[in-house]
Each structure stands twice: as structure tokens, then as C-alpha cells.
Image (cartoon, rainbow, N blue to C red):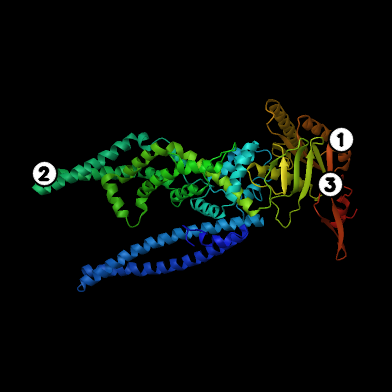
Amino acid sequence: MSESNPTEPRNAQTEHLSAREVYTANLDECAERILQLAGKNRQLAFIRMILFPTAAICLLFGYFGDSYHGLLQAIGWLSAVAFFVALVLHENLRLEDLRQKSNQKLFRHLVARLDRDWNEVPEQNLLPQFQDLSFADDLDVAGPASLLGLLSIANTFPGNECLQRWLASAPDWKTLVSRQNGIKQLAAMRPWRIKFLKTVRAAGSSVHEPYGLPRWAETPNWLVAHPGARILSYIGPAIVLISISGVIVGAQFEDRTVTTISAIGLGMGFLINVLVTVFWGSWIHDIFQKVSGEHRGVYQFASVFEMMSELPSASGNRTHYKDLLAEIRERATEFPSNAKLGFSRLLTLVRLANLQKDLVLYLVYLSMQLVFLYDFRVLRLLEAWKARFGRHVKGWFDSLGTCEALVSGATLADEYPNWAYAEQVTSQELHLSAVEAGHPLLPDSARVSNSLELRKDRPLVVVTGSNMAGKSTFLRATGLNMILSRAGAPCCADKFCMARFDLATSIRVRDSLSDGVSFFMAELKRLKEVVDQSSDYAQKQLQDPAAPQIFFLLDEILQGTNSQERQIAVATVLQQLLQSKATGFISTHDLDLADAPEVKDVSQIVHFREFFEAVDGKEVMRFDYRMRPGTTPTTNALKLLKLVGLDP
């Protein structure tokens, strides 16, 4: 399948296919194409191995042999030309092989996400500016087997930055609906999305941000910062050109003096050009590399922005919601200084900048460098381009980042058409209403969904249950769906309605021996942060009623103290949280805590339970992970002791 026409020949046949089926079909095609390319590579390598000695031998005997001069010279030059043609074809095959392997890696990634095969999903880490996100570790936002691993298929730094920024904070509903609308439109454009993902991935990796155009566009001009190099870049070529003219005039009029002086001047000019190239050439080539990108990524990004002309344009009857896709299209292809125009002009300059990498034209480049200081001439054109378009480049790549974030959400929506987009609660009595909500990071076959309503008159849900029954998973499922909704992506639920919440969590608390902090003290500090965060948000709501309130998720808190003190301490924490208008979930297997009046009076109590069955004469513990109302009627600690051979 050609790269310029990906997936189109089968669109009519694949519209009814699921996303998984399309990914698998593309994987098969990539594998087949890579095998074909390997065969062609071997053939070309053999042809080159034959052509080079043939050309060398025929030219040697054609010019220095005793007979058949004309025939041998003809065969030699034809073989030499064929050898260079084979070199060019071999390079094209190499680039095509890179593209196909990049595509293969993409589809393996997409399938691994669907299988929740986390060993095959590249680990997604938070960028430095988001590493202090308080709930990230508790809710597996980043790292192995994470929400970003499932959601993000962004392959550029702007794309990762945009998506992580969206997940980090709760947007207002107008912004959220704008993201949802963009995702819904892109979810219906599967062929375009796949072509987009292939093209962006071919441009380079997001890990090291190899494409330096945005950063180069914001830096001062190199020629202005290096006046000595700039002046010499004109003096050297001027001396060479004047000296060449002098040699021609001297030879024409047979004036030895003029010829000698011109020859000396020619040598001085060449010397200046060589020294300038030696001292500053590597810096200039570094600039060319930044602009061109890894594997000449500039060509791929030009195609990416070209593709954005296919995005839906702004509708005539604009709503009060921002049309993100129309904004991306306008900045990429319609504004006076749009990316499509800028890249069309930049591509010509990049081809000139990459002339020294062309095997066929390298001697031409070398001659022009010695005479004209060619690299300086190209750099001057690039800096003129920067003056025209440089201040717009960041905006172009911001649009690309927004597009990648929307494509990530749209891909998930296409893969899970039954998942629901978050909605704003309409009832004045509810904080949250989730219908058949599940944990999005679990495999589809293992996921168990539950429904729940969180009412304002009982703003606390106490989740009780035995060890391993599913309490922590339920808390994480709720938090992850809230975070997923921030990007405008669908939630793992049949219906998910909520108020505008920011999150505060205490689920995965760790002690720190190096800092002299025990587990209990670490947990107290984390709870203090949650309470302070709730208090801060309560103050913000006094100034702006539309500001988000805190939704807390507290898992098995204050385990490091006795039951009586725990009840008092937990009641104190919950009282302060509820006074700050916070709402949320707390899990516990301490049944006395769930029955404490100060907790029971403001909460809805639910539970998860286990059951036991006989398998081959042995008692085996099972869980159905279904949430039920009321306090758990069962415990399993003693049963677990017996199951592992520690019969009490």
C-alpha cells in the first residue's frame, strides 16, 4: 500500500469493520510490505555489487587499455550511471522501509492498548511541569499501565503537552463540550485519523523532541549574532569571483601579470572560504538539521499541515462553543501566515540545505560551497523565511498539539463506541450519577461495571468490603473516568453525569526512610494536603460559584492506629472536608468506622463481598466485584489465613 494513499482503496470495505479489525489488517499489510522491501533491498544490493566493479574495470581499460576503447568507455559510464541510480533507489527503499516499520509499530501500539497488554504499550511519563500532580500516582495517570498509556497516541511534544495539560485540571463545561464536539467529529473520520497518525509518527519521536523548528524560529538570527562570519561569507566569494574574472581576462589578453595576480587572489579566496567552512560550517549544518528534523521530518510535518485542510470548516451558524477543528484548520491552511503556506516555502529551502546529503549532487554542492559559500547563502534565505513566518510557528505547533490531543480522544471513542461522554448533572439534588461505570485500564473481559448516584444530602460514599473485593478499584475507576472526561474523551460507562470537580486523593501512600517519615506520618501529611486543598477551593467558590469543588477519594486511611482512635481521626478529617463543601468516596474494611454515627448520618454506605466455592475438594475464594448497598456482611481475613496454610 502506498504511503500517499493509505487505507483508501479499502474504505468502502472497512467502514463496517471495528477499529481492532482495521488495525489488524494494517498490521498484516505492513508485515507483507516489509518483506517485499527486504527482497528488493537484497536485489539492489546485488546489482550495486555488480555495477560498481563493472564500471571501474570498464573505465580503467577503456581509457588505459589497448583496444575496444569506445565500447568499454560506453559500458563503464552506463554502469556508473546505473550505479548512482541504484544508490538513489536504495535510499528511497530505505526511507520506505522506515515508514513501514514506523506504521507497524503504530498499529502494534494501537492493538496492545485494546488488549491492555501493558508490556507492549510504551510507557507514558508526565512532563516536568506536571510531575507534581497530586493525584497522578494514586490514579495511575502516567507510567506503566496508565491512563496516558491508554489515551495518548500523541507523537510530538506539543501533542503530549496539550493532552497532559487537559488532564491536569477541570475545564469549565463550555470548554469541555468544545473538546467533545471535536472528538465526535474526528471519531467519524477513521481513514483521516490513521493517515494523520502515520504521518506524524514518521516525522520523529516525541521523547527527545528532535524536530527543532519551533525552537529555532524563536531564536535570534545566527548571522546577526556572528558578524565576523557574515562579513567573511561575502568577502571570500567576492575575491573568488573577481579572481576568476581576472584569470579569464588575463588569459584572453595574454597578460601574465593579471593572470598571476588573479590566480593568487583565487587561492586566497578559496582559502578564506575553506577556513570559514571549517570554523562555522558545523554550526550552520546543526541549524539545517534542526529545521529539517529527524529523517527529514519537515517533509512529514508539511504533509500533516496539508492534511488539516481536510478538517471540517467553521459552520455558518457558530454556537457559543468553540469550534476547535475549525480553529486548527484556519491556522493551518487559511490565515495569511498559515502553516501550509509557510511549509510550502520552507520545503524549497530545506531541499537546498540538504544538498550536501545528496550522493548524486554532492560534487555540485562542494563546488558551490568553495566558490559562493553556499551554506551561508541558504542560511540567509532561511533567516528571511524566519522573519516572515517565525512568530507564527509556535501557533502552528500548538494547533498540531490540540489536533493530536483530539485525535487521541477520537481514537478511543472510535474503539469504544458504547462508552459515554460526560454530561453536566441537571438535578439540583445530585453531585454524580454513573451508570455501569468501569475501570478503563482493565481488559474488557475482566472489567466489572457498577452504578451509583451521589446525592447532595449525603455527600459521602463509604465503600466497605473484604480484602481484594474491589474497593480500591472502584475508587480508581471513578477518578479515572473523571480525568478521562477532562480531555473530552468518552468515559468507561453507559452514562456519566457529574458536577465540575477537581480531585484530591489519598490512595497510594508510601513511607520514606530517607526522610525519616513513617507510613502513618506520610498518610497524615497527605490527608492534611487534601483538607487544605478542599479549604482553598471552598474560598474560590465564594468568589466564583462556577469554580470546581473538590471530589476526594480516600482509600483505607489511617490504618496505622487503633480502631477507636481511627474512628475519631477519620470523623475529624471528614467533618473538615464536608464543611469545605467537598464530596467524595472513602473506603474501609473497618466495619465499626462505617457504623459510627458521625459517618453514617452523612453517607451512603455500599459494599463489595466475596464468596467461597468448592473446587476439587478445596475451598476457593471468589469475587464478583459487584457493588451492593449497606455494610458488608462478610469478612475474609481468617479465611485467607486458612487458605494460605495459617489456620488459626
Q: Residue furthest top?
A: 543
Q: Residue at x 14, y 45 (%)?
A: 260
x, y (%) of residue 247? 15, 47
Q: Residue furthest right?
A: 648
x, y (%) of residue 216? 44, 40
Q: Mark 3: which secondary structure? A: strand
* Labelled disc at residue 241: none
Front position among marks 2 and 1: 1
Residue named by callout 1: 601
The quadrant in which residue 63 appears is: bottom left
Q: As shown in the figure, which amino acid type bears the numbered disc 1?
A: Asp
Q: How many marks?
A: 3
In the image, 86: left or right of 314?
left
Estimate the spatial distance between the alpha carbons at disc 3 and disc 1, rounded to whole Å: 17 Å
Residue named by callout 3: 607
In the image, 252: left or right of 296?
left
x, y (%) of residue 421? 67, 46
Q: Mark 1: which secondary structure? A: loop
Labels 2 & 3 near each other (Cβ < 8 A):
no
Q: Tag 3 or tag 2, which sits nearer the N-term?
A: 2
Visible residue check, residue 521: yes
Q: Residue at x 86, y 42 (%)?
A: 590
Q: As shown in the figure, which amino acid type bears the numbered disc 3?
A: His
In the image, 344: left or right of 394?
left
Q: Residue at x 66, y 43 (%)?
A: 485
Estimate the spatial distance between the alpha carbons at disc 2 and disc 1, rounded to whole Å: 110 Å
In the image, 643: left or right of 439?
right
Q: Tag 1 or tag 2, which sits nearer the N-term?
A: 2
Q: Residue at x 43, y 61 (%)?
A: 93
